[in-house]
Image (cartoon, rainbow, N blue to C red):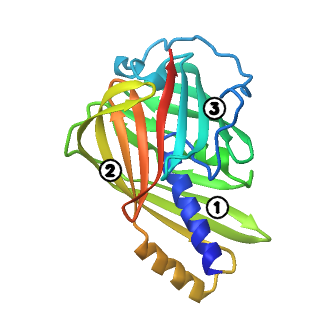
Amino acid sequence: MYKTTFHTKKKVMRHLLLIAVLWTACNNTASTNKPGKQLTAAITEDKPDAGPAACNKLIFFEPGAEIITKSYDGAGKEISCQFTKIVSVKNEGGMTVAYAEASDTTRANNHVSNMKYSYKCDGKTIYFDMASMLRAHAQDPNATIEASMVEYPIAVSAGQTLPDATGTMSFERKGKKTNMKYRYKERKVDGKEKVTTPAGSWDCYKISNQVDVEVDFPGMSDKAKQMMQTMTNQMKSTGITWFSPDFGIVKFELFQNAKLVSRTEIISVKR
């Protein structure tokens, strides 16, 4: 019971954190197939007919842009590869909205997950649609998901504090409801750093955060709940995101008790 609970909590923490920054890290990864080969939707080249100009320079708001990211475990072993296409970018109510399709491939079983989600920008802030990304990875298609938007200001500055992000995924097993609650908190801009990946080099802002995850399993006894709380208190999960105001998110790292658990970065960009 203890091992199962610990493994599940650790997996959920890592999964939810990586989704928050747009890329999904699985416990397995990249295939020998060419990334994105499974996508069939055509790219539409419609430029936004209006909308904040500051949004248009970001890679996630360029129609037809193709982005490849890879995730690695703490030892540097590749665990996943995601290919993303920006299908269309439109102006909706003064907000620039980018619609993306992605295929995420896992190495261990060569499994491909296809996803659809969106990003929004009002000229000052980028908003990541966490609920739609969580829904794409929910094992239960009937899962109920409620989540706030994850915000990244374009005019970011060192020392700035960013809003928390929260969400809940609920689903039923044999008539019993399971809830996974998370909170990304203490999001702070630590300063500027130059980041180099296989895709290039960027002047980025380093943004740190802590994450709390609470999992309530069906039939969990009071003793099990107490054990879960003890593990939560002992397991400190933190994340670091490198964000370029002229590009978008470039790199992300997840730590547990100050130990690197996973790293995700952009390895290829095609405009």
From the viewer's perspective, tell me whether residue 231 is left or right of residue 39.
left
For the residues labelled 1 and 2, the Cα–Cα distance comes to 27 Å
Q: Which residue is mark 3?
A: 102
| Structural crowding at the residue carrying mark 3, measured as other residues with C-alpha within 10 Å and reported as few (<14), some (14–19) or many (≥20) | many
Instruction: Pinpoint residue 49: horizontal percent, then vertical percent.
Output: 48, 11
Mark nearest the camera among 1 and 2 is: 2
**Amino acid type at image mark 1:** Ser
Outermost residue toward the bottom?
223
Say above or below: 194 vs 79. above
Callout 2 secondary element: strand
- Where does label 2 land, which residue? 208
N-terminal-most mark, 1 or 2: 1
Residue 48 circle label: none
Please name whichever residue, 105 or 63, is drawn nearer the observer in this view of the structure. 105
Cα separation between marks 3 and 2 = 26 Å
Residue named by callout 1: 170
Q: Is residue 192 above or below residue 58?
A: below
Q: Amino acid under label 3?
A: Ala
Number of labels in the image equals 3
* Discs 3/1, front: 3
Report the Cα–Cα distance between label 3 and label 1: 24 Å
Of the numbered discs 3 and 2, the one sitting upstream in the chain is 3
Q: What is the x, y in percent for residue 70? A: 54, 37
